[in-house]
Every structure is written in structure tokens, then in C-alpha cells.
Image (cartoon, rainbow, N blue to C red):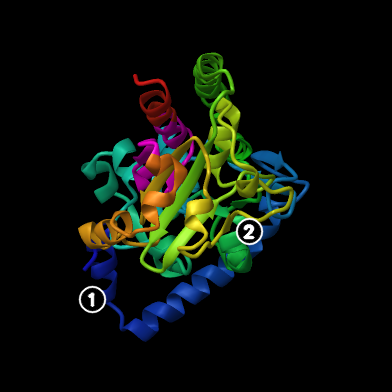
Amino acid sequence: MRRYGNVQKVNAMRRGPSACVFLAMLLLSVANLSEARSSWASEACSGRLLESSNIVGGAVCVPDVPARIAVLDPYFNMQMALYLDLPVVAAARSGPQWPAGVTDLATEDQLSSIVYLGQFQEPSLEELLSAQPDLILGDAYMHERLLENLTRIAPTVLVDTADWETYFEVISEATNSSRQFEQSLAAYKERLAELQDQLNGEVTASFLRIVPGGFQVYLDGPSAYAPMAVLSDVGIGRPAAETTDGDTVFIRPTWEGVPLLDGDVLLYVFGGGHHVSQGSTLRSETVNHPLWAEIPAVADDQAHEVSPDHWTAFGGLHSAEAILDDIERIFLGE
């Protein structure tokens, strides 16, 4: 049962023509819109031509000031859009509920007015068309295979970068929100610099994610997951075994490999993202395992559980600020 979205409007449409007739109407509407696609990426751009090496296709003609934005990714797309106070009218999710970063940034009333597009892997074109967006934001990795159909509905910007700050910058440029982005990022950078001075580069940290299927150790490197990049930016080092020069994001150690995590501090998280933590059972089984006590930071009473809300469901500047809060609390006792 849908909790979000323009349910009344969609149901009213379905009570009219049969499902087959409505689908035919939908396909006809999409086909008619295909003619407009060329104008969205042509030289005769009637809005703004967004050019970037960090978007699929390199250039998209976007509205001067978009008024109806659809987002396909509930993490970077959705949370960055909400942070910038953009007019989101439709959005996809990754599960039955919005990530905590979304509910932190929007009220229930705001979310209830958003057309629910289904799961982000396969957003509903029917619902997307009904929302009448003038701009679609998505992720290159997740949505490039859908690009042809998406661009028949509205100009589509699929962001293609692993760097969360660059990703956020592209979102701001696509939505004519660069000034707000730059001001917010500048304030974040100022706080980051203050913490760098206080930490003085004298501590290392290991990071372990614990899910029902085993362990994930997130690495520092060129394609590091955003929270690991925040750790690096603030001056917290990582052990050599948790650093890479390649594009590997995480490794999956067995129980025998977990005690080799030798950072001064262990940051660990249960579940998060598309995984559930299975509550107290998984936690109890992990911390009571005999090899858990052999992790150096655990033996030194320097192991700290952090929330998956931002550490494994990162959504942009809002999450980065929450991670800095944890760093202050854990490393500086504030």
C-alpha cells in the first residue's frame, strides 16, 4: 500500500479507462514527447545548457529555474535536492521507508505530497509521467540504461562521479542553486579545517560494517565511499591494509581477518543501506564472538558504534555534517 505519492490522482485515472487503454495512452504520450527530446539537448537550447564531464552525455539543456523536479536516487539525488530546498514532486525509494537523511530534511507533509516512483532500480514511467516534471535527476551507474525513456519525459541529468562534493556541485548547477551550494560548502570546509587543527593528524581509524551476510571494510582510495573521504579530509588516517590505490570500495574479510583491523580507533556500524541489522541478535552475536575482543581497538576500549543513517546511507552535506558531529564526539570528547 502506497504511503506517499499522488494516490488519489493515479487511482482516479485507473478507475476510468481500463489498464490496457491507460497503458496505451501512456505510451502514446511518451512517444509524442520524444520529439521534444532533441530540443532538450540541442544547440537551440531554450533554457540553460549544462555542460559537464560529470554527467552522462556531457551536455543537457535544463530549465533556467526548474519548478518540478523528479529524483530517482533516494540518497544523493533526494537528500541533496532537499538540502537545497528544491521543488521535488516525484521520487524513488530503496525500500519501504525513506532513508533517515530524507526524513531529517523534510516533514511528513512534504513527503506525502511527493509522487512515489517505486524502487530506484526500476522507477515507474507511468508515475513519472503523471508527475509532469520539468527536470529529472538520477545517477549514471543506476539509471543510464533508462536514459532514452527518461529523456522522452523531461530533460534528464544523470550524475557520473564518485566524489560526493563534485556530485553535489553538479546537482546545484543543474538546478540553478550554485550560490546556496557554495555558501553551505564553505561553512562545512571551515568546520573541517578547525577539526583538522584539533586532530593534528595523530590518529588512525578502522571502519567495519557488519551485515547479516558478513563484514565489509570500507577502504580509503580514489573511489572511497563518501564517509571514508570525510575521514581522510579531516585528517584521520587509515591503516595500510585499509588503503588502496585502485578503485576498490570495500573488502569482505572473514572472522579471521577482522582482528587484523589495527586502527587506533574502530568505527563500526550494523546494517544500513539496503541491509537490515536484525536488531539485537546480530549485535549480540558479533560483540560476543571471541575474535571480536582480539581487535586492537576493542581491547583498548576504543571501539565505537556509529549510526548507519549517515555512515552507510550517505546523502550529501547533511550526512557529512553528521559525520563531523561523530568525529568531534569520539575523537575529541565533545
**What distance separates the C-alpha of mark 2 from that of mark 1?**
30 Å
**Which residues lie in the magenta part?**
300-323
The image position of residue 261, as x and y in percent, is: 52, 48
Q: Residue at x 45, y 60 (%)?
A: 215
Q: Give the camera-side residue of 247 and 107.
A: 247
Q: Is residue 317 magenta?
A: yes
The answer to whether residue 264 is above or below residue 96 is above
The image position of residue 251, as x and y in percent, is: 57, 59
> Which amino acid, by three-letter code, is at mark 2?
Ala
> Which amino acid, by three-letter code, is at mark 1?
Arg
The image position of residue 121, as x and y in percent, is: 48, 67
**Can residue 5 be spotted in the picture?**
no
Residue annotated with mark 2: 36
Q: Give the camera-side residue of 41 and 179.
A: 179
- Left or right of 4? Residue 29 is right
Residue annotated with mark 1: 15
The answer to whether residue 250 is above or below residue 181 is below
Q: Residue at x 45, y 66 (%)?
A: 123
The answer to whether residue 152 is above or below residue 138 is below
Compare marks 2 and 1 and give the one earlier in the sequence. Answer: 1
Mark 1: give few (<14), some (14-19) or many (20+) Cα within 10 Å.
few
Which label number is shown at residue 254? none
The image position of residue 200, as x and y in percent, is: 57, 18
Work out which quarter of the rendered image holds the C terminus and state it.
Answer: top left
Residue 285, picture quadrant: bottom left
**Marks 2 and 1 in Cβ contact (< 8 Å):** no
